[in-house]
Image: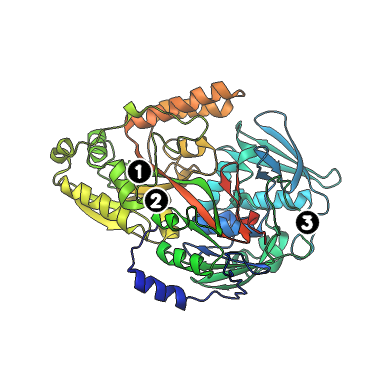
Amino acid sequence: MTRTRMLAGFALVAAAALTVTGCAASTPDAGGTAAATDTINTELWYAPATFDPAKATATSDAYIARLGFDTLLRQGDAEPLVGGLATEWNAASASDYTFTIREGATCADGTAITPSVVAASFEYLVGLDDSGAKTWKAQAFGQGTPTFVADDAAGTVEITLSQPYSQMLSGLTRPGTGIICPAGIADPEGLAAGTVAGAFSGPYTLAESVAGKSATYTLRDDYDAWPAWTTVEGAPAKTINLTVQADLNTSANLLDAGGVDIARFYDSNYTRFEGKPGFSDVTFSSSAYNLVFNQDPNSGSIFAGDKALRTAVTQAIDPEAFNQASLDGLGEPQYTVNSANYSCALNEPSLLGTYDPAAATPVLTGKTIRLLIMSNWDPAADYLAESLRAAGATVEVSAPDPADWSKQMRTQPETWDLAVAAENAEAGLIHLSIARYLGPTYADGGTNVAYTDNPEGLAAYQAGMNATDQATQCADFEEAQRTILERVDMMPLITDTHRYVSRAGFASYVLSGYWDPSAMRITG
């Protein structure tokens, strides 16, 4: 959620001065069409913290993981799931799954991607003591222990879970479960640095990177494992140039001038291209923004064991004003742990507190709140801090970069009381967001960032994870959400709507609610 305001003149100077590493940019002619090219120039909001998909935490990490590493399954367009490195899959139960691995798939160094390679990559993922890996493990395999049995002769991998997990197939579409080839597992430091060419299993390999500034990816000549998408048209780029650009006004200037081909917007800069000839866009829900109350009793957080204080915070914050401050009013209302578009999302606004700063003031006056928020979210941070200060609280704002923000929220509860969490709204898996507020913490192998003790919610959540039919599953998941909201363990704010705008000759695609960077195409 980056929205740094700039004077228009300064932004134009910045746009003219910015160069893209390895750029072979095409430029539009007077008719708004693009010249022939084999390159796509696009952007990242933040510099990647790691090139190891298993350790990916921020959006940029996941973005590049999708380019370089294939997953067993992918999100589809005509149907929710399509094959990736797996061509067939079968769920005998919520605990027992079998995958047939694609014949002829290879790593970037020519190594065959066999069932044993797949199993070794998964074993690497689940064996990591890393907060990012724990998130991907939970998404892929649930809270139990997975066992992997590879049969290279049969071409299959069997996955058995110690606890039933009905969401595993969808979980294995996530970029952090990308298959890492043997060369990468043998050199984890080089893998994280992006220097192991043979680590990549996906369509692109990292050709060049400049720390904090840019990365260039090159299409593999031997790659032929594209998912069977039916709506994706055009040619994959042979080169993808990525530059770090945190200012959306500059992004808009670059896109308009042909300096980039595809750019992402969530604020009013998008309106510059709405209905404009020579530009097209796709829309999707990207992140659900929530306030998280730290309830770790050993952290020193003022919210541990104090529901009245948590309620007062919800009375001091107006979600619509937050929407205006952070997203120019373009966000969507949210009533639970993630987007209202999710299957099994609870839709009971009456469970949420009402904006009432007068009621909040007597409770918040004299309290000191340590607010944790990601860097470059200045308007959002300003609104939240000033709203709480207006209600009598002293607010100390910490705004580290995405990697440190994620690390603090997940593993350093002693550093914060209230955090803004950007929950991924593209995965379509409501149980992932529920698990942020109940069950074991990251230190205990779970994903509970609120450090709560909610046995009722946990029981409902676990029942949903064991359910075999959709209706029962939704009823259980909705009950789990209800307990979270009634306890005021978090406060839903808004879901942001993101738009990827492409200039003429380029396109990108949203697949089952997920914008897939490997599906960017050259169309002209």
Q: Count the labels in the image.
A: 3
Q: Secondary structure at mark 3?
A: loop
Residue at the image position 61 percent from the left and 70 percent from the top: 216
Q: Amino acid at mark 1?
A: Val
Does the residue at mark 2 contact the one at mark 3 (Cβ under 8 Å)? Answer: no
Q: Earlier in the sequence, mark 2 or mark 3?
A: 3
Residue 321 visible at all: yes
Figure check: 193 above or below 416: below
Q: Residues within 10 Å of mark 1 (few under 14, many from 20)?
A: many
Q: Earlier in the sequence, mark 3 or mark 1?
A: 3
> Residue 238: image x %, image y %?
69, 66
- Farthest right residue? 153
Q: Residues within 10 Å of mark 2 (few under 14, many from 20)?
A: many
> Residue 444: image x %, image y %?
47, 43
| Observer-nearest of 222 and 477 | 222
Give the labeled residue for mark 2: 409
State left or right for residue 19 relative to residue 106. Answer: left
- Farthest front residue? 31
The mark lying in front, picked from 1 and 2, is: 1
| Observer-nearest of 498 and 409 | 498
Give the labeled residue for mark 3: 224
Q: Amino acid at mark 2?
A: Met
> Residue 320: image x %, image y %?
31, 42
Q: Secondary structure at mark 1?
A: strand
Residue at the image position 51 percent from the left and 62 percent from the top: 44
Residue at the image position 47 percent from the left and 53 percent from the top: 274
The mark lying in front, picked from 3 and 1, is: 3
Figure check: 352 above or below 176: above
How is colour applied across the structure in the image?
rainbow
Q: Earlier in the sequence, mark 1 or mark 2?
A: 1
Does the residue at mark 3 contact the one at mark 1 (Cβ under 8 Å)? Answer: no
The mark lying in front, picked from 2 and 3, is: 3
